Amino acid sequence: MHRPVAALLFAIVLAIPVVVPATAAEPPASPPGEPAVTPEVDPAADPSGAPDATDRFIVMLRTDSDTAAVVDKVGKRDGVKADRSFNKIHGFAAKLDAHQKRDLLEDPDVVAVVPDGVVHVTGQTIPTGVSRIGGRKNVIAAIDGSDHRVDADVAIIDTGIAAHPDLNVAGGYNCTTSNHALWRDKENHGTHVAGIVGALDNDIGVVGVAPGARVWAVRILNDDGYGLISWYICGLDWVLSQHDPKDPTRPLFEAVNMSVTKYGKDDHNCGLTNKDALHQAICRVVAGGITVVAAAANDSHNAALNIPATYNEVITVSALADTDGKAGGLGGNRCFSWGGYDKDDTFADFSNYGGDVDIMAPGKCIMSTIPGPSYEYMSGTSMAAPTVTGAVALYKSSRPNATPAEVREALRYLGNFNWKTSTDPDSTHEPLLDVSRIGSLGTFALTPGTTTPPTAEGGTSVVVPFRIARSATFFERVKLSIASLPDGWTGTVGTPSLMGWTADDDQVTVAIPRDTPAGTYQIGVSGTNQGRTVAGSIPVNVVEDDPTASPPRTTSLASGSKMGQSGAKIRITWPAATDPSTAINGYELERSLNGGAWGDTRAFTAATSFTFDTVSFDATYRYRVRAVDAVGHWSPWAVMAGSGRYHAFDDRSSRVIVTGAWSRLASPTAYKTTVSGASSASARMSMTFSGRSLAIVAPKGPHRGSFTVSMDGVPVRTVSLNASTASSRRVVYSWYSPSGGTHTVSLAPNGTGTDRLIRIDTFVVGR
């Protein structure tokens, strides 16, 4: 088509009501499998055309019962005359008196006896067209004016379908009278619905969502748009009876469209709790693998009040008002229906709403086929539903194994919210149907998630990533599981299923037995989608390695500690150990005194990399450390380079040089009972030493001053001796150089403020 479809069809309807003259051809034959029934009596109709449901009942039988045998039995026993028998759904309909009803309720073959009821067309509703849902971009529909037909069968449960040059009518079944071949349409509704689903892409009239899909008339409404529940069940029974001629194990139909309604509720138990025969029948159809689409209805209230719209097993469709076939809300008004003009891209004012609604489709002023043959605009959820049914046909044409639940999930995932959701009467906004990205069923593979396999040791757990490699048209859900593991291994899948164009990253966490030999092992993973199973293999490298520990080192005296008269507390540090595959779990430290045996073993957690030790002056100490990993493997001992020896030089040592005003004081708490004090900034105390560490020891207390420490002539620290409580022999400054060498330390009082006096006790050098 080279002109906008809506404009072309509008002209055709106004100027040429009959596009192509109807032929006198016989209606297409029904497929084999028509259920055998007893001669039927058609109920009388009231003046509006609605059939009379007075004293009419639906008798539901056990699923293992023989319907024909039961009908024959109750006919002979009670005089019951069944006018509709449901061989696959197991039941029948009949007019019953009180005695017959009582006897049936006592019959062991009978599950329920429920009143028959009247259903009717949901109303004049029509989708805005294939453009709004991305139909022209769909590669399966391939809308280009050439008659390429979608390979799918759709049952239209409605008023019938009229022969029309713009429809691929494959056959049908009539449940409204005893003439099952009388599935023609005189009410217009069913033919209009059929055109929305599958009008031919033949460059005349209109085009459907799934052009050329085979539409089947299942007539359960009479020429005035009314029907009985028993007729409805009759139609469903016929649908479930039909099988794919190429594969008799499969149903014939990909989808069922139900643009009909009746007040009722969902018992959330397939009608078994509230004896809803229609619900039971629909559940059996869905269980047979057929996707059922239902109009939400046109009461401007919650769809929970209408059946079949409220049933969880169907895809329930609300209506969007769209006037220009595209998003943006700029289309203005297009046509008058349901008492007014809806604004573009808004929730249709007549449409039902609520949590039972699964998806939305255009349903305002939709052009489609009618008997004549001709075309007409209609509005209502009756037009939105077949738009979704056409989408089901597109989807299922290349995905025959997709379950009804998978079809619903896929269409909802592909939908969008490019409409004025603020106009939705409820807060749960349904996505708008979008078929633009439905292509042929794609493929997928399971591959490792990294180029380098993960590495781990026996006795540990390791996370092994893998990917779902999706083809361009594959977005569907993949259920994931572990298919195989090496002996003794256990594992779990991170996410049991993934769905979406970019949902491709997952992982397996496996526990490796402790004594597993080194080598490369394979984890088998499996993905299933719509009857397909794909296997993948993910490698894991198992190693047997030990941690690596680094030698410890002794530093200066511990800052802030109190030096003893014969020794001091030193700080021992070591770098964190490493392990190529396993976490470090802890350390052990040992020491040797004056070249003796190793001992005094101490254990530490993985977070610990230092400790303190009390040493005696002028004794020789060596330290070594080893690490253990999470699976119990120990590293070799790492021994410190050289040995540690500490010597104390008190303030009177000949190595200590003083200049300026220093006082020499006796103190029983000082090292060797003497300290030196000064307060003048010109006073200096220095010492040249060889070693790796140095500590300055001094008393602290109230009203003490501070001094500046210089190392090799460079100021490095200001040290305060002021403290609220007096204490002696405190390590007030520590210095360490791993390379050692000869250095000169000097200190000088700061000589400012009220509290200027400092006292120095000892220098401790570590070699």
Image: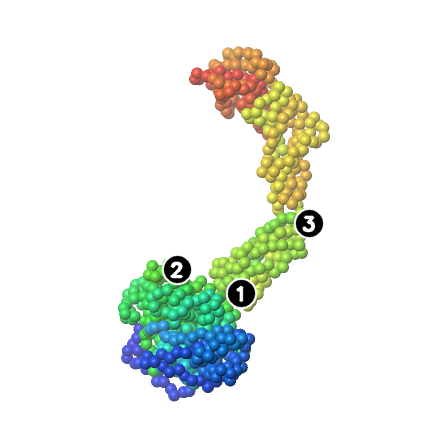
Residue type at mark 3 is Asp
Q: Is residue 378 left or right of residue 652?
A: left
Name the residue rendered at 64%, 20% in the picture: 566
Instruction: Report the front residue among 181 and 494.
Output: 181
Mark nearer the N terminus (1 vs 2): 2
Which of label 2 and label 3 is nearer to you?
2
Labelled disc at residue 683:
none
| Mark count | 3
Q: Residues within 10 Å of mark 3 (few under 14, many from 20)?
A: few
Residue bearing the label numbered 3: 515
Mark nearer the N terminus (2 vs 3): 2
Q: Is residue 667 left or right of residue 303?
A: right
Q: Give the structural element (helix, strand or loop) at label 1.
A: strand
The answer to whether residue 359 of the structure is visible from this angle is no
Instruction: Report the front residue among 707 and 347.
Output: 347
Mark 2 touches mark 3? (CB < 8 Å):
no
For residue 749, above or below residue 68: above
Residue farthest front in this picture: 99
Residue bearing the label numbered 2: 428
Instruction: Report the front residue among 575 and 3.
Output: 575
Mark nearer the N terminus (1 vs 3): 3
